[in-house]
Amino acid sequence: MQTHIEQPQRPAEGQGLPERQRWLVMGCILLGILLSNLDSAIANIALPTLVRELGTSDAAVVWVVNGYQLAVAVCLLPAAALGEIVGHKRIYAIGLVLFLIGSVCCASAPSLSFLVAARVLQGVGGACLAALGPALVRSIYPRSLIARGFASIALVVAMSGALGPTVAALILSVAAWPWLFLVNVPACVVAIPLFLAVAPRGQGVARPFDLSGALLNAIALGLLVLGVDILGHDTGRAIAMLAVGAVFLMGLVWHQSRRAAPLLPLDLLRIPVIALSGATSVCSYAAQIIAYISVPFLLQTLLHRSAVETGLLVTPWPLLVAVAAPIAGRLSARYPAAVLGSVGLAVLACGLVSLAMLPASPGDLDIAIRMAVCGAGFGFFQTPNNTTMMTSGPVARSGAAGGLVAVARTVGWCLGSSLVTMLFQLNVADRTTKCLAVAAAFAAAGAVVSLARGLTTSGASVPTRS
């Protein structure tokens, strides 16, 4: 007698999954997003160790970080497009498998070139997780609770970015560098079969994959990301990369403008509320990464806190994101995202200004309170903004919307980190204070752009048809 294992059915539009099944699927989604975001920051701490262990140079070892970030950046939109064609579940599961294989290869890497190649494979998997996670959330939650799902993602993204260096430092204090990657293995081994068992079966859209568009996307985003990355220390080559990347980007836009469901989601960007939400997201993530990079320098270099003390003092930011994000998710059902986002980013701007204005000898409580204000503001903004981006377009374009959310985050991080690098390379006086001032300016600009969404009427409600 044959045993038939029934696949979980796709929920009816707007109804979501039963609560127990929804939480199991959501656990797999959050775990994947946690791993992909954590690994984008966790390797930074190990770079000096890798130089010694692998016998390489400081300049070459940076590709352990760059290879991962570059792979994520160029694969986000193609992964989102593939998810729409063959089903979100299938591509997300492939992402988990690629991330698992990449992690094992990283841990067993005998040389720098092998490690970089393994990090690229990890990045491809991470792109699948980052792009398809939000689309899956839209399909498993009932319409009335969908903001809570995006609040959970906001929490995981914020905490993984803030706690990544601390987690890496703790691992390296008790184990060798391969364990930075081996810790991913048991999580993936558990998540893959569980996700395949409980995630609903999705239906793809019958259309060919845009291979030429994916190639143009890879060249354009690859050159732009690399150009921004080296802007602070190799200006001439960076400008050349940015110029060529801009040409390919214009070619990509022209190529995609003739397609009904473009890989670069121009159809979604023509919806004003989505375009403005994307711009708001870029501003907010630029402010976030500038603070994440510069605050440790402020605390350790100027205020003479130890690495452990710095980690503890930074922790209130993600903790308050954890508090504020669910509250914002509930409020978003009653108040416009334009208002909630503006309030959150205004609070973030005030918190960043207060950090820039710290006295010469502040107490730990004073620092922690200012970090908490930043976290509360960021958490209050993020959930309504991401919910708006994901639910203001057609259901059939949920994968593209998820890719757009991840691309906006990546662009903001690249922009912010490049500005920090430039200010540090220029060796300006009070550079950490100036970095925080720039971060506050980004947050304030984001608040203004967010408020502009209130002048639009598009995407005011969650669409019910594709």
Image: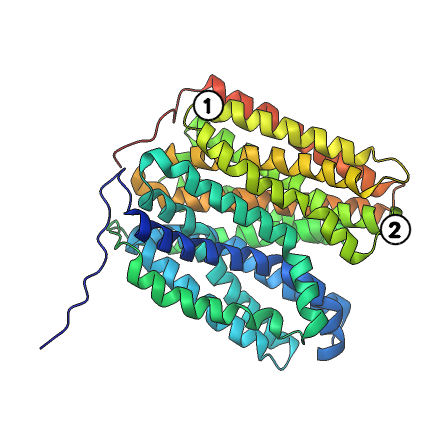
For the point 73% across and 37% down, the residue is 369
Q: Nearer the viewer, mark 1 or mark 2?
A: 2
Residue type pointed to by label 2: His
Q: Residue 459's spot in the image, x, y percent?
A: 38, 27
What is the quadrant of residue 79 in the picture?
Answer: bottom left
For the point 61% across and 69% down, the residue is 180
Q: CA distance from mark 1 to mark 2?
A: 43 Å
Residue at the extreme left of the image, as rendered: 1
In the rendered image, is residue 213 in sight?
Answer: no
**Secondary structure beneath disc 1?**
loop
Using the image, tell me which numbered label, if any, was put on residue 84: none
Residue 85 sits above or below residue 138 on the image: below
Residue 283 sits above or below residue 120 on the image: above
| Mark 1 crowdedness (10 Å alpha carbons): few <14, some 14-19, many ≥20 | some
In the rendered image, is residue 375 in sight?
Answer: yes
Drawn side of residue 171 relative to residue 8, left or right: right
For the point 44% across and 50% down, the residue is 131
Q: Residue 163's spot in the image, x, y percent?
A: 64, 54
Quickly name the residue at label 1: 336
**Secondary structure beneath disc 2?**
loop
Ranked by sequence position, the earlier of labels 1 and 2 is 2
On-image quarter of the C terminus: top left
Q: Residue 330's spot in the image, x, y percent?
A: 44, 31
Quickly name the residue at label 2: 304
Q: Residue 363's spot in the image, x, y percent?
A: 84, 41
Residue type pointed to by label 1: Pro
